[in-house]
Image (cartoon, grey):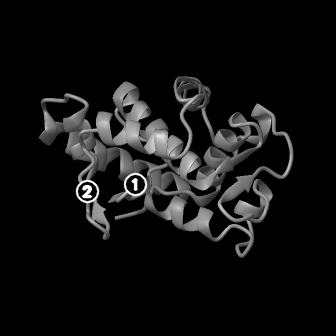
Amino acid sequence: MPSAFNPKKAAQVIAFLVQGRGGRADIIDVVKLAYLSDREFMDKYDRPIIFDELYCLDHGPVDSQTYDAIKKVGKLASPWSEYLRPRQRHDIAVIRNFTSEDFDLLSLAEEKVMGEVLDEHKHRHKFKLVDWIHENCREWSNPRGTSVPLPYFEVWKALGRENLDEMEKHWNNIKNLAGSLQT
């Protein structure tokens, strides 16, 4: 099955969110904002933005490949270095101010949802954001020091979707289509 994950799009998502946090952000903040953006987009449009594998970690759900790449920023080449400076301790920063044209892989709807997520959580940072996710994202289960896969249908279930079989079929169709468009 083709993968719909696109590292350049993931880098653009992270750069958009970091820029929305003032150009520099704690890694925990940006990873949680990316997950919440995916979750909100799934609620509105029945698909994620990043198309990453989701996992539950102690501090909440994450987009797995995106999180792994963020932890290595500074050691990786393109596409991450096109948007982000090398990590400094727990912070990540954009290399410059970007415009919408720089985020060519993001749709206006995706940018709008990410902007709404940034606005909703502008006063929550780091562990306040983690606490909010633990209290409000029912799909998260505490892996107690490990990591546990989080299937997309669990997110839809937590969002109140009832036809989970249809949602999973819909998801597989979207993922296959997105993956085939990238090749």
Q: Position of residue 123 (x, y in %)?
A: 58, 28
Regarding residue 49, the answer to whether it shows in the image is no
Amino acid type, label 1: His
Label 2: how many Cα within 10 Å (few below 14, some 14–19, many 20+):
some
Q: Secondary structure at mark 1?
A: loop
Residue at 54% x, 56% y is: 182
Residue at 41% x, 49% y is: 177
Q: Quadrant of the N terminus?
A: bottom left
Q: Position of residue 103 (x, y in %)?
A: 71, 40
Label 1: how many Cα within 10 Å (few below 14, some 14–19, many 20+):
many
Residue at 74% x, 66% y is: 78
Give residue 47's quadrant in the image: top left
| Residue 108 against residue 18 in the figure, above or below | above
Residue at 59% x, 52% y is: 10
In the foreground, 166 or 50: 50
Q: Looking at the image, which residue sits at the far bottom? A: 75
Give residue 89's quadrant in the image: bottom right
Amino acid type, label 2: Asn
Disc assigned to residue 142: 2
Which residue in the protein does label 1 denote? 59
- State left or right for residue 34 relative to residue 151: right
Q: Position of residue 90 (x, y in %)?
A: 65, 60
Q: Secondary structure at mark 2?
A: loop
Q: Position of residue 56 (x, y in %)?
A: 32, 57
In the foreground, 134 or 23: 134
Chain-order first, disc 2 or disc 1: 1
| Residue 75 against residue 86 in the figure, above or below | below
Regarding residue 151, the answer to whether it shows in the image is yes
- State left or right for residue 42 relative to residue 95: left
